[in-house]
Amino acid sequence: MRLILLGAPGAGKGTQAAYICKRFGIPQISTGDMLRAAVREHTGVGLEVASILENGQLVSDELVNRLVRERFEQADAAAGALLDGFPRTDVQAEALDAILGADGVKVCVNLDVPDALVMARLTSRRVCQECGNIYRESDIEAISQTCSNCGGDVVQRADDLPEAITRRLEAYERDTAPLLSFYERRGLLVRVDGDQDAHDVTAQLLSVLAERGIS
Ligand code: AMP
């Protein structure tokens, strides 16, 4: 099974993606995680995109399309995958069709959240630099800056500062929100209310997947 998780930054995609991937035994393909890893490891791609990520802008379609195409060539993604943060533009959605075939995606879930919630969530978000575990600024792990999962450093992402969040929301409205109608026209779109406790979001997500024969 292949599914797409859409939603504004801070909608809870990462949290839900980790759960769904574990539950169904499929890899999470997060272009944001791949790009952040490249920046951390100072690869050629990392050097090219570091300041773009920091500013909250989108990197080029060409680059992320290539990363996703190469990722789907790996054996673990053959049976299924969850796409988190891709596609983000209509060019990327078309590239995904070219990679997987037009009927390659089984369902596209959008996590609906209001902008004010996004701002509150992202400014208080802290992440483990190593494993990506997410914390609130009031969590003990965030205060002590040590991840309870892997011992990595817990930090605030540069693009979780208010000006960058505003730019990410603008990019989402301009480039990504139109994809909702793209997938709706294909009968693939389902909406889940992301403005609730993470466990309730997961329960709703599992139930919409079950309605589509994924359980
Ligand atoms: P995310 O973790 O999904 O919020 O992504 C973090 C940042 O990585 C974004 O603000 C963009 O700069 C970049 N990025 C991630 N995925 C994409 C994509 N599909 N297209 C363009 N830029 C992306």
Image (spheres, helix red, strand yellow):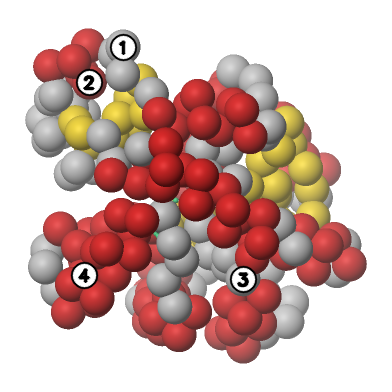
For ligand 1, which image quadrant applies?
A: bottom left
Between the C-alphas of marks 2 and 1, the distance is 7 Å
Residue 89's disc is 3
Mark 1 nearby-residue class (10 Å; few <14, some 14–19, many ≥20):
few
Between the C-alphas of marks 4 and 3, the distance is 21 Å
Secondary structure category for the residue under label 4: helix
- The answer as to whether callout 1 falls within 8 Å of ligand 1 is no
Between the C-alphas of marks 4 and 1, the distance is 30 Å
Residue kind at label 1, given as amino acid type:
Ser
Residue kind at label 3, given as amino acid type:
Thr
Q: Quick one: quadrant of the C terminus?
A: top right
> Would residue 40 appear left or right of 18 to someone viewing this image?
left
Pick out the residue farthest to the front: 163
Q: Residue 210, relative to residue 168: is it above or below?
A: above
Residue kind at label 2, given as amino acid type:
Ala
Secondary structure category for the residue under label 3: loop
Residue 46's disc is 4
Residue bearing the label numbered 2: 142
Residue bearing the label numbered 1: 138
